[in-house]
Amino acid sequence: MNTANALRELLRSGPGFGGVSLLGLLIVVALYVLLVFPLDFGESQWSNPIVWVDNPKAVPPAWTNSLRPEARPLHRVFEGTEPHTVQMARSGPVHSWRFPLNYASSHPPTFLAVTLADVTYAERPPLVLISLKRPDGKQLRIYRHTVRGPREGESGPFSRYGQTPLRVQLSTDEATVTAVQNFLADEFDLRLDGAQIGGRVDRFLFGVPTGDSEEAFAPLTGDYEIIVQAAMREEGDSVGKVRFVVGGAVFGLMGTDSLGRDLARGLLFGVPVALFIGIISALMSTAIGTSLGIASGYLGGRADITIQRISDIVANVPVLPLLIFMLFIVGPSLWMIIVILVIFGWPGLTIQIRSMVLHVRTNQLVEAIQSLGASRRRVMFRHILPQITPYVFAQLIFGAPAAILSEAGLSFLGLGDPSIPTWGQILEAGFRTGGIYLGYWWWIVPPGLCIVITALTFMLLGLGIEPVVNPRLRRSPP
Amino acid sequence: MAMETFPQRPSSQPLVQLHDVKVHFTVRKGLFGSESVHAVDGVTLDIGAGEVVAVVGESGSGKTTLGRAALGLIRVTEGHVSFDNTEITALSQKEQKAFRRRSAAIFQDPFASIDPYMTAYESVAEPLVIHGIGSDSERRERVFQALHDVRLRPAQEIAGKYPDLLSGGQRQRLSIARALVLQPQFIVADEPVSMVDASSRAELLALLRELQERFNIAFLYITHDIATARYFAQRIVVMYLGCVVEMGEAADVVRNPMHPYTQALIAAVPEPDPANRLHQRPSLPGEPPSPVNAPSGCSFHPRCASFMAGRCELTTPRLLEVEPNHFVACFLHEGSDAYQN
Amino acid sequence: MSLFRPLLVRSLTMVGVFFVVLLMLVLTLGLTGFSDRILAATIGEQLRAERTALAETIRDPDEMEKVLEKRREELEIFYGLRTPWYYRLPRTALRVLTLDLGEARSLRSFDGSNRVFDIVTERVPNSMLLLTTSFIITAIIGIVGGSYLATRQGSWLDRFVSGFAAVSYAIPTWWIGILFILILSIQLRILPSGGMYSTPPPTEPLPRFFDLVSHALLPVITLVLVSFGPSIYSIRTITLNIAQEDHVKIARAKGLPESRVRLRHILRVAAPPIVTGLLFGLAGSLSGSILVETVFNWQGMGRLYYDALAGTPDENVIVALTFIFTLMYVAIRIVLEVLYVFLDPRVRYTD
């Protein structure tokens, strides 16, 4: 009746205000995620390694650079579709893309990778060349690739790299290693063998020798240019997409995990999932707990005894072992987790509601309503329920954090729904793959914090609502 | 108990008939033992259409239980309750609903008997909703008529209010309106004025009386106050520990109380004379004993001013018609035939 | 004699819990066809073993297949695989009840046994060690802190603890454990990050003991940290409620010294509800310890769960663990309930 008043009272209390504003924030984020992310994010993206292949693995967030004396390289991705310039050469048109790269880090990039996609040609395959122009004016060709030619029996026009783009990790590519070997010999008079260069291409390409030893290179900062050229044989041949990745040692807002997954995206997706788990399981167990509590308290007799005995037993079952067991047997699914949480979540409320109903029932209201000819159901749900609703509402809110924590714990044990990433699952991956022992705090701390903040939101809301609800509860005289 | 002593009203067929009604409660005691409490122990009573019968007694006398039994709100252990010649103790759900439509109750506590989460309008409309009577506009008309009848004014304004904004007197008018809205033939009013401010008590009682006369409603008026019983009722039934000890025309019982208990009750009524303010009135010694262990014989004997040793504590006196339409259960009025059975 | 009823009701409830869990285990296994799969796997393994043995005597492959087929039939009848699962239900229940828990697929006990019973039972003391230590510490902190806070109602400390208790409900215990490892073990290298003993473990009793303590420190602190807030808070509230009762006011009015009032008139009356509260906390810390053991690689039953779930799950171990966990929990609860009934004379009136 005084919803507006109650809300005002709630906002005036510290926890209430905190809870409401946090919940508002979470809801906004959840709505944003639902609008922007695909609903099958888990399957189509999170668990799909191809999506994350160009990301650096297990690197901290980009903002950590501002906390360190020396900046680690940022992750840079260059992409081009339409060629920046087209020149006519003897052999045919040459499409080129030029990507300027200002390199300021005192460390070399972690890897270099190139991806070509959607190549079409009429007769003869184009040739792709990639060169790096350094701030010291030196330039070298680091990659050369002839697109796969026609197969026997195949007729043009030919399209290549459509379904599966060509991706080359230059840091370990043999041709690149050889190119770097020659470059070092020509420019710096350094003769290193392939094994010394392989996998460490980046430090030579982005550095100058210090002279201390053969392999000692200091990063060379300044303006680089990556030049991608595709030499076509015919007018109309094209390369649909060119992508060049300079792997960073930091990434994005939240860093990446050991598969290169952008943790920020995983954490964001966790918001609506956690809210859903908390709210749905709290709603369902509150509904069951309340109806059984009312029935038990109001009907009395054998129904009461039965309900009380059952809830006594269920309330005393050690829940986590059974949760683990049942999820293990029926297989991990988010719905199953919710259903099981509900199955074991109602008894506490039933016992409390029953005693409240007994209290309400002894007053003359129930008898008065009965004397009017109301059915039991009407007395229970139209007259008793409204009196305990505020209390039920507070309990509903307190139920949400418990569900969120339970899901997180189960996910941490490896029983999470693999098609729906949650914070617990991110933590589990970090733990199982040894991320904590390697000190990957950005993988471990944020998901836990998200869990705590979400659970705390509901706790604060509950704490704020309780005093608003309680005086109303006491108003009905014993 | 002998049948011939059951009093019968000579008038036409009564509306409500209570026949040898007993209500026993079981109280768990220890691990396996249990004990039964005789809240109402064999009460026979008829209420004619449009008649007001008052049941007077202290707390614990079983008068409230009797009222609940008369409305079928409580299971009768033994005996019969019938309404308009229909036994209400064995009604189907449908029949019971039909009975509820023709009967109503007004309770003692105006704060507890009205749903705090319903507006005054919703509370009064609730019986109409339950029984599915009328369209919205018809309901509206009947609710406002009822609010008007109990003089809740301005009805328009009060209708939208929640009970916590109403005074005790207003709430009790609201519960009267709720009882009236179905136009019942029979109302059990359990101490309807005892929890209302003294100032509005008389007014409320006058209202009840006016409505009773206007709609010719039969009332079972339950009270501990024999003075209001005299004012409101045509007949008075005095109960003590679950039994009727005296019953008769209201004027007769008050003018000529025959049972020592009735006499004590009347003596305890304060007189509206300021000169008597400091006057020590005779009061009933002791508290009424708990019905869990009622005294033997006449249960009133431990407090009785006219206690006859060797008789009252051994045998239970029967309810006898001592004067026309005036029944008393006391050896003082039983004469020598008490020994004959 | 009046003690009898509450004792009976409480014990029956716990026995009920036990049987409900047992029933759920057996029913879930049967209904989902899980027990069929386990039995089929057992038979398959046995046949493989017999095939190698028979290869010595029987040369003809057709002959061999025939013998094995006959053997399979015998085994399937023996294990009851040819009858619907519910016919096997009593026998499965009986097997579980008699702790005949079968053999593990890949997990082994410390001395190499593959009997599930050995694997699980050797973990019980480790779990109990962690659980009881942290439970006792939490209880002591709770009682001391709670009864102290009750005298300082409304102070900043009181409000701080209330807030802290509320926050505790929102924190996953195991995550706190991970944070501890991250900070204290990995960054600062103060305490070991997991396990129960260093490798190799010290052989002398005293160093061995201190080694165990240093390994137990983080898990115990983790468990205590998350549960002591709510524990203090609930004991404070119980104590406060009792301090407002009339008999306490009378005791004060009589001029009894405050310490005596607090001890005899408040704490003694508050003891039973405090114990109830702690008892319910036990169920919570049981769940908490499963996860905390996992985080700290503490070789208890909780960590065994994690190990059994990882990779190719070890079904028999998981079933056995669930059962023994419940059994352990029920046993502790019954013991405590009995103590409780004797502790609190008022129980006799309730129920």
Image (cartoon, rainbow, N blue to C red):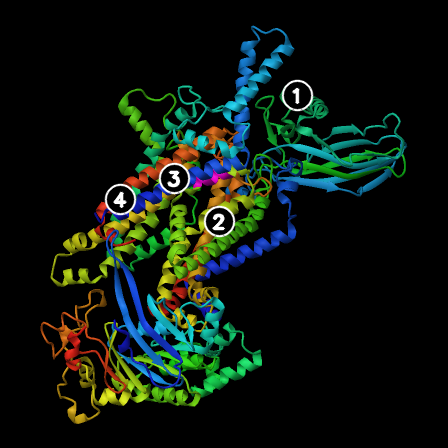
- Please tell me which residue is depicted at 55% across the width and 29% down the height of the picture: C37
- Looking at the rendered structure, the kind of residue marked 3 is Phe
Q: Residue A414, can we see it? A: no
Q: Residues within 10 Å of mark 4 (few under 14, many from 20)?
A: some
Q: Work out how far the residue at label 2 is from the one at label 1, CA to CA, in angstroms.
A: 69 Å
- Which mark is drawn over residue B229? none
Q: Residues within 10 Å of mark 1 (few under 14, many from 20)?
A: some
Which secondary structure, mark 1? loop
Classify A383 as above or below C260: below
Question: In the depicted view, which residue is nearer to us: A359 or C152?
Answer: A359
The answer to whether the residue labelled 3 contacts the one labelled 4, judged by CB atoms less than 8 Å apart, is: no
Whether labels 2 and 3 share one chain: no
| Residue identifier under label 4 | C140
Classify A46 as above or below C161: above
Magenta residues, dominant SS class: helix
- Horizontal and vertical percent position of residue C51: 56, 13
Label 2: chain? Answer: A
- Which mark is drawn over residue C18? 3
Which secondary structure, mark 2? helix
The boundaries of the magenta stretch are A320-326
- Looking at the rendered structure, the kind of residue marked 2 is Val
Q: Work out how far the residue at label 2 is from the one at label 4, CA to CA, in angstroms.
A: 33 Å
Q: Residues within 10 Å of mark 3 (few under 14, many from 20)?
A: many
| Residue identifier under label 2 | A342
Which mark sits nearer the N-terminus, 2 or 1? 1
Which secondary structure, mark 3? helix
- Please tell me which residue is depicted at 86% across the width and 38% down the height of the picture: A87
